[in-house]
Image (cartoon, grey):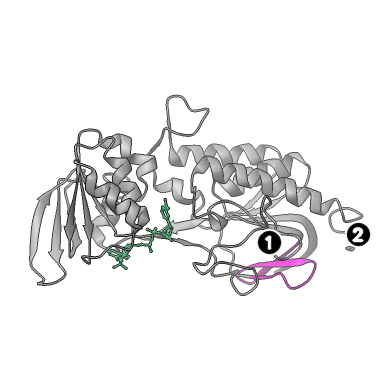
Amino acid sequence: MSDQTVRELIIIGGGPAGYTAALYAARADLEPLVIEGFQWGGQLMITSDVENYPGYPDGVMGPEMMADFRRQAERFGADYITDDVTKVDFSEQPLRVWVGGDEYRARAVIVATGASARWLGIESEEHHKGRGVSACATCDAAFFRDKDVYVVGGGDSAFEEALFLTKFASRVHLVHRRDEFRASKIMVDRAEKNEKLDFVLGAVVEEVIGDVKVDALRLRSTATGETWQVAADGLFVAIGHDPNTSLFVDQLDHDENGYLVTKPGSTETNIPGVFAVGDVQDHTYRQAITAAGSGCMGALDAERFLATFEGHPGTALTANR
Ligand code: NAP
């Protein structure tokens, strides 16, 4: 199906950034079409309690919060397609977006496809996600008060997560597959001085053991292949994130890790009318609240951009700039 209507705005991605952009855009009468992804909700769908989002003093479950975000934008007229975008063409106006064989057109597009944590890719990890296995210490460390936890990774993220976890856990073990770290020296120094933290080097996590909760891990030596079991209450996987930008990297400016580049202090990309918000352009903060704030900025930037066009949705495009 080819929908020839030229909408004001398409938002790609249904996480805190995309839904907040949709809320602001819908309230500004831009009638946004949100192509939210087959698995809408983003990374918060694999988070249990969210205790650091202002406005929820008793905490909230991640999926419930995303359903609230979604419903709030819907109330003001956001339309949803619960499917994945498969292709985009931003080479000329109108901007074009495909979901399989269906084409949608708009004057402005906000990209809010987020980032995905890298996982180890073992079956038992999948089983325990949100139940003792996490990829976000900022989100989940407080649930591991006085517990014994393991962190996997040797980069700055792993050290940051491990150091943060020492504020809660009784013991934190950082497991790294090599005996040299990728993390900056200052992080390593800090970790080495922390009495709650120790290192298991030259090892990988082979299995998460436990029925409902995590009880133990099986580790494997990368040098000898020998395996052994350790008691553990939790596992934090901190082996990096990948921005979900494969659809865009041949058209939008990005850094060496694939994160979209926006103009300082704005959500504008290198293509007029295309904006990037949330984790897809932020590898520093990566919080629901910062993604939501960025989504708001994207909607305001898109609104400003659209004001430079004459006419109304569906009419011929006449750009004033
Ligand atoms: P990263 O630097 O790419 O480190 C990923 C780590 O995970 C590496 O040590 C890697 O091991 C390990 N790893 C990857 N896949 C693995 C697997 N399947 N099993 C076991 N280990 C695996 O990623 P990052 O730590 O997320 O950092 C990303 C960027 O953000 C970096 O530029 C970093 O400096 C920056 N950052 C900065 C800060 C800060 O300054 N406060 C905080 C966080 C991140 P190998 O070393 O063997 O490859």
Amino acid type, mark 1: Thr
Which of the image's four quarters has the C terminus? Answer: bottom right
Which of the image's four quarters has the N terminus? Answer: bottom right
On the image, the x and y values in percent for residue 186 come to: 34, 52
The CA span between labels 1 and 2 is 19 Å
Q: Residues within 10 Å of mark 1 (few under 14, many from 20)?
A: many
Q: Indicate the quadrant of ligand 1 in the picture.
A: bottom left
N-terminal of the pair, mark 1 or mark 2, is 1
Say which residue appears at 78% left-offset and 57% top-offset: 7
Q: Nearer the viewer, residue 273 or 15?
A: 273
Query: Dominant secondary structure of the magenta stretch?
Result: strand
Q: How many marks?
A: 2
Does residue 123 sit above or below 165 in this rendering? below
Which numbered circle lies on residue 320? 2
Q: Are marks 1 and 2 in contact (CB under 8 Å)?
A: no
Which numbered circle lies on residue 269? 1
Amino acid type, mark 2: Asn
Q: Nearer the viewer, residue 273 or 69?
A: 273
On the image, the x and y values in percent for residue 178 come to: 22, 67
Whether residue 113 is visible, yes or no, is no
Q: Residues within 10 Å of mark 2 (few under 14, many from 20)?
A: few
Say which residue appears at 29% left-offset and 53% top-offset: 188
Does residue 261 sit above or below 303 in this rendering? below
Query: Residue 97: within the magenta?
Result: yes
Say which residue appears at 61% left-offset and 75% top-offset: 250
Part of the protein shown in magenta: 88-106
Query: Residue 316: within the magenta?
Result: no
